[in-house]
Image: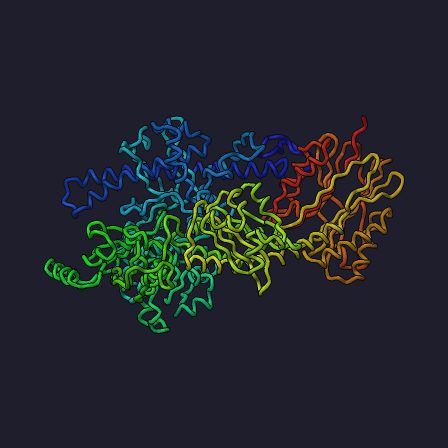
Amino acid sequence: MDDVRCGWCDAPLPDDAAPNRRYCGPLHRQAAWRARRRWRAAADARRATLLTGTDLLDRAQAVATRAGDPSPAGRLCAEVADVPGLAEQLVRNAVQADRQAGATWAQIGAGLGIGGETARSRYGRAHGAGAGAPGADSASGAEPAQGAEPPPRADADAVAESDPHSDSAQAVDSNPPSGPGADSNVDPAGAAPAPVRDTVADPHPIPDTGQVPDTGRATDTGQVPDTGQVPDTGPIPDTGQVPDSGLDAGASPTPDTSPTPDTSPTPAPEEPAASAPDALRPCLVQVVRDTGASAGLLYLVSLDGRVLRLAATTGVPPKIAALWERLRVAASGPVADAVRERRLVWLASQAELTRRYPKAALVLPYDVALAAAPLAAGPMVRGALVLLWPGSRPPRLGAHERRVVGAARDRMSALLERAAEDGRPVLPGRAPRHAAPARGPTAGPAEAQAAADFANRLPEGCCALDQEGRIVFVNTAAAELVGRRVADLLGGLLWEALPWLDDPAFEDRYRAAVVGHQPTSFTALCPPDRRLDLRLCPDASGVSLRITPVGIAATAGTADTVDRPAPDHQGTGGLYDLMHLAASLTEAASVRDVVELAADHIMPAFDAQGFVLSLAEGGRLRVVGHRGYRPEVIEFLDLPPFKDATAPTVRALTTGAPLFFASPREMARLNPAVPRLTGRGSWAFLPLIVSGRPVGCCVVSYQRPHTFAPDERAVLTSLAGLIAQAVDRARLYDAKHQLARSLQTGLLPATLPTVPGLRVAARYLPGARDMDIGGDFYDVIRCGGAGVAAAIGDVQGHNVNAAALMGQVRTAVHATAGAPPAEVLARTNRLLTDLDSGLFTSCVYAHLDLADRTVRLATAGHPPPLLRRPDGRTEILDLPPGLLLGIDPGAEYEATEIPLPPGAVLALYTDGLIEAPGVDLGDATAVLAGHLAREDPRDLDAMADALLRHSPSCGDDVALLLLHPPPQP
């Protein structure tokens, strides 16, 4: 085949290549595909950069032209203020193009007149905001693929340059995908993206005529506007295009006058796009006022489409809203369901919330009604609107309320959609923005003074808090009751001005008042010994707090007293961390999961420094997990017998009562060695009891002495019950899992036979933990003389039945080993058909003749074997196809004989080594063959381990068998 060459390395293709074959193999095909994506993006980038530069120049011309015109007030100021943003957009496009072209940050910084690290910190994250955008600084897009060093041929470059419609050019019209192709700047946990300016689109865009205008001016002036700092205009719109400005070479871009897609649509005159971010919060305030709701929350979908981030609130202080700042779209909850199902979710009461969404009820334990509506326009859902009412409202959402919610939803959706179409989607910021609710008539100076005089004449204390919890008014009686001056209290957060109120009990009452819009009250202890009755009366503008004395010389620890020991105290929000723990423990599958989840939640929630979990086994307590302890301490605490009355863990377990030691002196009375070895100052030993049966003990320790208040003891004791139930479930799972693994391991050969003239390496990797047990198997059988049989297979399913059938298949192969490969598979197939298990099996059987140096192979629907020749060339063996075992008793199989010279490697494997979602099996097999070719067969075990490291780890079992007749010395 003359002049038929590889489209990547320009090497001639073999004469027997298929007519439509264009590359040497899959590696060069993938490298060329990646290169085409990069060059196509670079070609489109010049258009994007030129559009931005032209828009900048035309904007400046428009300002200069109208400088003497009597324009509406503020019009010119707005236009001038937008010019630096356009300039910054041009710089970002150029930086993104240079990074795609391979420029280092030092080169880019030199072109901008700043340092390389400064350039990286300023532009290194913003240009990757478009999910999956080519050129993003991620591990998948920053460097060419391995083996992609040779430059492409010019014809491939020309094809890429001439096609402005790359696959990624449509990314702006759909949610970015999750997984490896998602935005590299959004972590899987849903962390906040890089800071963005809260704007949507250019209020005065230049109309797009479909052709790049020629202004007669260079688009690159060689310098960056020096404003003292570079304004943050947010991420570059994800258009699938990577600009190429040649900043690293100091040259101006070459104008590309080819037609370009419309990138700057003109907003409707009645609602300019720039007003969208400012209009979202007023829309939220208005819908709360018009529906009579007590609070409103606005959620926006993150760039990766997996997380809902709280963007704006009204009627809910930031301190409270932080609990609901992040919601997973895939999780079960009213807001997530509204987004996924594109419908209004209405919950009339706390009881309905608890019944339908028990996990959500844990973090919203108040008597409220809730409505969640998706913000959707066209095929996209961009966020959600959430409204809260007091639980005392009517159980049905009225027709007027539905109309108001629907109108607000449609207006917000339109603003978000228009912003996305303009290339500047509204994204959630680092923290939600708070919008002040609508207020009634403002009192005049005389009325305000009269109100203050009235409050000061009252015998009880009065205090007013704004929506954030700051003290905006306090009368003299209240200041005297709490022992502070009025001037010291005004302007501060209540729980900071009065630290003894920084307590979960107070926070719970405060949340109940603010969220539920219902009065609440409780009693607190003001140091040193004054008990005060506090009553909270909320409305949309804040909370009124009435403070009255209850008594003098109160006794700490009274049932209705919130006694906060100092300085050690439970962190604010600890109670809600425990609610999260209760929800998390329901998903713990193993004992290790329980230990990690409990330690992660308990230690920060209670400000603890140590955590130990022990389980009862064989009359002793065995430590199964710990945090904050040295190994020698754990060795001392491990395995105390139940007869050891001095061990605090044993005493707590055998008596069933928790033990609290507030100081080393108290602990020394029971066991002096514990404080000496652990170095701790206080301990809580919590027995783990399930249905009256002791299962273990949990220890929480503190570095310093710590007085355990009654409410803290109650929470810790309740927590122990949750952990005990989770541990009991996890132990059952672990036992079942270990039983399944033991069964599977027992059915596989413990050792492989030693065969002179043949080296063998075998590997088996179980699948993911939740896959239970698999049916992959392998075997090597001596057949007498120079004959050796090898088999590998995969039984359908992941359960005990699959494992049992796998054992029967191995037995059948053993019984017929030595017969021709086709006959071995035929006999095994008849046996499986007679068993009628309903499960199918794939298998490859090989008979090696070490004297003749040949191998005969037959397959029953199994992935093809690989043969690595002594010179390193590796081929995929094309065997005659055969039907899976266990389907047709009359199925026939055909064997193929190939040479097996000394130094060759025959690789048999199951599909778990190559199979991955979305990957063609042929391409995956070719990639595995490439890995096999690069490994050194002199160390067969290292070769097997290296092949396993390249497996896609998709959760399936993996079996691998390598057969290697070593080269003659």
The C terminus - image quarter: top right
| Residue at point 61%, 44% (across, down) | 952
Question: Is residue 280 something one can see in this rendering?
Answer: no
Residue 661 in the figure: left or right of residue 952: left
Q: Horizontal and vertical percent for residue 40? A: 47, 38
Residue with the most extreme right position: 785
Residue with the most extreme left position: 446
The N terminus - image quarter: top right
Q: Horizontal and vertical percent for residue 236? A: 38, 42
| Residue at point 26%, 63% (across, down) | 539
Q: Quadrant of residue 448?
A: bottom left
Q: Horizontal and vertical percent for residue 63? A: 21, 40
Q: Quadrant of residue 466?
A: bottom left
Could you say which is closer to the camera, residue 90 or residue 446?
446
Q: Horizontal and vertical percent for residue 51? A: 34, 39
Could you say which is closer to the camera, residue 221 or residue 410?
410
| Residue at point 14%, 45% (across, down) | 70
Could you say which is closer to the camera, residue 666 or residue 111?
666
- Is 414 placed above or below 198 here? below
Residue 366 in the figure: left or right of residue 494: right
